[in-house]
Image (cartoon, rainbow, N blue to C red):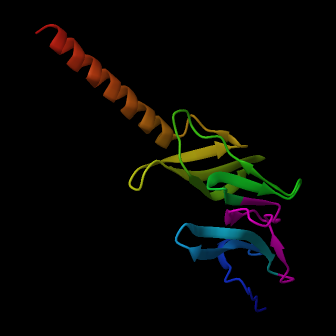
Amino acid sequence: MNLYANDMAQPKGISENGMWACGSAFWSGNENQVGAINASKWNLETGERIYLVGEGDVSDALGINNDGTLVCGSYMNQPAYWSESDGLWHVLPLPRGASGAGDVYAMTIVGGDTIMAGFIYESNTKGKIVRWINGEVDNNNPFYQLILYEFLYQLFYLFLIQLFYQHL
C-alpha cells in the first residue's frame, strides 16, 4: 500500500506490531513560525490518516502503541500524549525544577503501566531525560537521580566554599 500526504507529513514512529504509524507535517511559513504541525496517525492496513490536532495547534507525533489509541510526542512544545479515549492531547508534568520545551520520544506498556521516555530542553546544549509512568514523573528514574545528586553535590560544594571563607 502506498500512502500519500499532500502536506509533506513524515512518519516518525511505528507501533511494535507494524499496524500503525505516526508523524507530522513540518511547516516553515516564515522565520518566526517553524515547527511540526498537524500530528497524525495512519492505519497501515487501511491507509486511513487521522489528524490529532485542531487547526493552528502545534504538535508532533513520535511514538504510537499497538492498537493506535495512544500517541506520544509534544503538544504546543510541551511533552505530551494523545489519547483516543477523549481525542485530546495531555501535557505531562515536568520534574521538580525543570522548565522548557520537550518531547516524549517513546512509550511502551509493561504489566498494565504505560511508560514514556522523553527529554526536557533547558538550553541549546542542556536538558533532562525524563521517564513518566502512567502520566506521572518517575522520580526513581536513574537519570533524574543523577541530576538530583549533581545538584546536591553542587549545593554541598557551595556550602563548603562559604564555610571556608567565613573562617578566613
Q: Is residue 126 magenta?
A: no
Q: Which residues are magenta?
A: 45-71
Q: In the drawing, does residue 31 fall left or right of residue 27?
A: left
Identity of the residue drawn at 83% across and 61% down: 69
In x, y percent, where is residue 153?
Answer: 33, 28
In x, y percent, where is residue 77?
Answer: 62, 56
Q: In the rendered image of this protein, does residue 47 appear above or below residue 73?
A: below
State the image quarter where residue 4 is shown: bottom right
Q: Is residue 53 magenta?
A: yes
Quadrant assignment for the C terminus: top left
State the image quarter where residue 30 is shown: bottom right
On the question of residue 75 being in view, the answer is: yes
Q: In the rendered image of this protein, does residue 96 appear above or below residue 161?
A: below
Identity of the residue drawn at 65% across and 40% down: 93
Please name whichever residue, 139 or 91, is drawn nearer the observer in this view of the structure. Answer: 91
Identity of the residue drawn at 71% across and 43% down: 135
Q: In the drawing, does residue 75 fall left or right of residue 53?
A: left
Q: In the drawing, does residue 149 fall left or right of residue 131?
A: left
Quadrant assignment for the N terminus: bottom right
In x, y percent, where is residue 100?
Answer: 53, 47
Identity of the residue drawn at 76% across and 71% down: 40
On the question of residue 16 being in view, the answer is: no
Please name whichever residue, 153 or 123, is drawn nearer the observer in this view of the structure. Answer: 123
Question: For the view shown, which residue lies furthest in the left direction?
Answer: 168
